[in-house]
Image (spheres, rainbow, N blue to C red):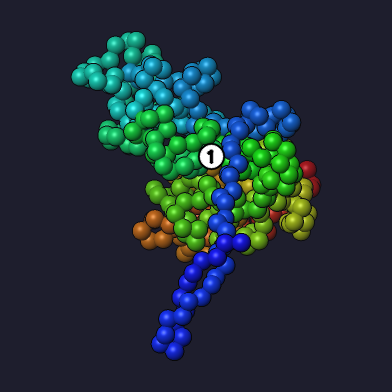
């Protein structure tokens, strides 16, 4: 056994003391990322659901995007693109060969011209750099801003590290093991798991909102950032914490591998926890008209790509509560933050555009969940 000679201070005197040397702790090797293609060998069913969701496509290589038949911004060819951001359900943005997000007005890189040939126009829409999948339109994203770095890897990729530059591209902040949100983004690196080291005990399965909240958050969790009269995108975690549903986890309602855009993407429906409102709703004009709980209580008050109307964007809010205070405003006076509720402008007038706020308030007094039930029952 090894010992070291030390000194103790006692009564003003330095006295020698023997102390047993502590063995140095060896650093435990961190498990490695193996890639989603390895997980599929045992988890085919989960992979089938995951592939149909938006997660794998948060970031993908240009060759994969080209094979998928995605459009290009005007003035660019696939030889100019390294990665495509998005490509499922919402929008597309593009990263050039230096790792910077494309913000140009459609001029070919390194070309000093402002006139486009017919060939350029066929490749996209000149002057636009974001393609909106919802309606097939193009829009500007940071138009003309130079050297806009791609600093989104923490949520768009798997096995992210903020150190270095992926593929040696100066415009990319950080590196990753796999582009897109793969299996290991939520379950952790699978090296030990597939290597049989402990097997079941060494893979993360954390079905709580904090896991989803790592990426479905913007700014501080106790605020709901807003801009232009809408909640900003990817902040469902902020919204959930601001209302009575905060005791729930995301997977209480959602199937984690399946997109919520599909009917089988939800584990439970609202009536599972709200039987009284469900009973009122049954046979009402709301039900006969095909209006669902989410149409009002999860109005599209959040914007990621397009705005459909003055009070309707393209993503459902997770606030649920609707304020019936006629003086209520959904946003702070400066418009930078949303409060923890929807107002009737978003819950009602997004569909009833020709009506007034007063009309909506009056309708709620008649028992909105069972509205028109007596009349509907006579038909």
Q: Residue at x 28, y 15 (%)?
A: 116
Q: Residue at x 50, y 58 (%)?
A: 221
Residue 106 pos. (x, y %): 31, 23
Residue 233 in view, yes or no: yes
Residue 315 pos. (x, y %): 53, 42
Query: As rendered, which of 25 and 324 lies closer to the eye?
Result: 25
Query: Extreme bottom residue here?
Result: 11
211 relative to 280 in the view: left or right:
left
Query: As rendered, which of 320 and 349 lies closer to the eye?
Result: 320
Circle 1 sits on which residue? 159
Query: Extreme left residue here?
Result: 112
170 relative to 340 in the view: left or right:
left
Residue 131 placement: quadrant: top left
Q: Residue at x 46, y 39 (%)?
A: 153
Secondary structure found at label 1: loop
Q: Residue at x 41, y 21 (%)?
A: 72
Number of marks drawn? 1
Query: As rendered, which of 160 and 266 lies closer to the eye?
Result: 160
How would you rate the neighbour count of disc 1 (Cα within 10 Å): few for under 14, some for 14-19, many for 20 or more? many
In the depicted structure, whether residue 321 falls above or below residue 184: below
Residue 132 in view, yes or no: no
Residue 358 pos. (x, y %): 51, 57
Query: As rendered, which of 367 and 13 lies closer to the eye?
Result: 13
């Amino acid at each position: 056994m090894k010992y070291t000679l030390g000194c103790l201070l006692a009564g003003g005197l330095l006295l020698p003391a023997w102390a047993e040397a502590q063995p140095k702790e060896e650093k435990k090797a961190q498990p490695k990322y193996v890639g989603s293609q390895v997980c599929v060998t045992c988890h085919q069913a989960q992979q089938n659901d995951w592939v149909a969701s938006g997660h794998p496509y948060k970031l993908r290589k240009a060759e994969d995007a080209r094979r998928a038949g995605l459009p290009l911004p005007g003035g660019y060819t696939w030889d100019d693109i390294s990665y495509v951001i998005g490509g499922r359900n919402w929008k597309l943005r593009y990263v050039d060969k230096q790792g910077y997000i494309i913000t140009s007005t459609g001029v070919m890189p390194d070309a000093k011209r402002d006139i486009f040939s017919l060939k350029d126009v066929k490749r996209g829409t000149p002057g636009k750099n974001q393609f909106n999948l919802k309606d097939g339109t193009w829009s500007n994203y940071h138009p003309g801003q130079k050297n806009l770095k791609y600093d989104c890897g923490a949520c768009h990729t798997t096995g992210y590290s903020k150190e270095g530059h992926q593929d040696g591209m100066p415009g990319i902040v950080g590196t990753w093991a796999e582009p897109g949100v793969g299996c290991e983004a939520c379950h952790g690196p699978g090296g030990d798991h597939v290597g049989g080291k402990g097997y079941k005990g060494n893979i993360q399965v954390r079905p709580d909102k904090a896991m989803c909240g790592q990426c479905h958050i913007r700014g501080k969790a106790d605020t709901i950032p807003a801009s232009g009269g809408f909640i900003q995108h990817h902040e469902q975690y902020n919204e959930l914490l601001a209302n009575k549903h905060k005791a729930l986890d995301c997977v209480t309602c959602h199937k984690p591998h399946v997109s919520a855009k599909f009917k089988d993407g939800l584990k439970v429906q609202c009536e599972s926890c709200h039987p009284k409102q469900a009973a009122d709703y049954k046979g009402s004009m709301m039900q006969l008209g095909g209006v669902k709980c989410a149409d009002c209580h999860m109005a599209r008050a959040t914007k990621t790509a397009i705005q459909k109307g003055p009070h309707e964007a393209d993503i459902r809010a997770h606030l649920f509560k609707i304020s019936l205070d006629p003086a209520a405003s959904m946003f702070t006076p400066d418009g930078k933050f949303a409060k923890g509720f929807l107002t009737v402008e978003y819950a009602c007038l997004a569909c009833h555009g020709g009506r007034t706020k007063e009309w909506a308030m009056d309708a709620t007094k008649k028992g909105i969940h069972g509205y028109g039930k007596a009349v509907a029952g006579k038909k």
